[in-house]
Image (tube, rainbow, N blue to C red):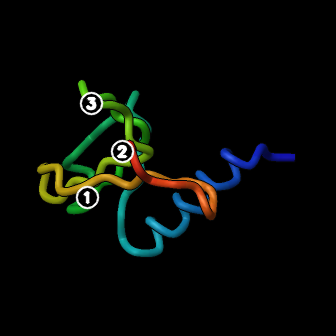
Amino acid sequence: MAQPEEQARENIDALLERCGWRVQDKSSVNLQAARGVAVRELSFSTGEPDYTLFVDGKAIGTVEAKPVGHSLIGV
């Protein structure tokens, strides 16, 4: 049985893919694979969001998944 975090990642991956994003691991990034690429757990000096979203090779935003009711303050 999948752990809750693993199940959440699978669900989010599926949602992103249905919306047209190409989901990739940080170990094998190819920003030219599609117009919209979502990279899992890409490291930055400020932290490691669950997903970093790229359009045409440029970062446009991040996705940080938390359990229902969890505060996003400080994320």
Q: Which residue is mark 3?
A: 46
Q: CA separation, marks 1 and 2?
A: 12 Å
- Whether residues under marks 3 and 2 lie with C-beta atoms below 8 angstroms apart, the answer is no
Residue at position x 12%, y 50% in the image = 58
Under mark 2, the amino acid is Val
Under mark 3, the amino acid is Thr
Q: Which residue is mark 2?
A: 39
Residue 7, percent across and down? 70, 53
Under mark 1, the amino acid is Ala
Total marks in image: 3
Residue at position x 42%, y 37% in the image = 41
Q: CA separation, marks 1 and 3?
A: 26 Å
Q: Nearer the viewer, residue 2 or 21?
A: 2
Quadrant for residue 8, please give it: bottom right
Residue 36, percent across and down? 25, 61
> What kind of element bears circle 2?
strand
Q: Nearer the viewer, mark 1 or mark 3?
A: 3
In the image: residue 27, left or right of residue 46: right
**Which mark sits nearer the N-terminus, 1 or 3?**
1
Q: From the image, which quarter does the C terminus lie in?
A: top left
**Which mark sits nearer the N-terminus, 1 or 2?**
1
Task: Judge the density around disc 2: few (<14), some (14-19), many (≥20) Cα neighbours within 10 Å.
Answer: many
Task: Judge the density around disc 3: few (<14), some (14-19), many (≥20) Cα neighbours within 10 Å.
Answer: few
Residue at position x 61%, y 62% in the image = 69
Q: Nearer the viewer, residue 47 or 53?
A: 47
Residue at position x 55%, y 65% in the image = 14
**Which mark sits nearer the N-terminus, 3 or 2?**
2
Q: Residue furthest right?
A: 1
> What kind of element bears circle 3?
loop
Labelled disc at residue 34 = 1
> What kind of element bears circle 1?
loop
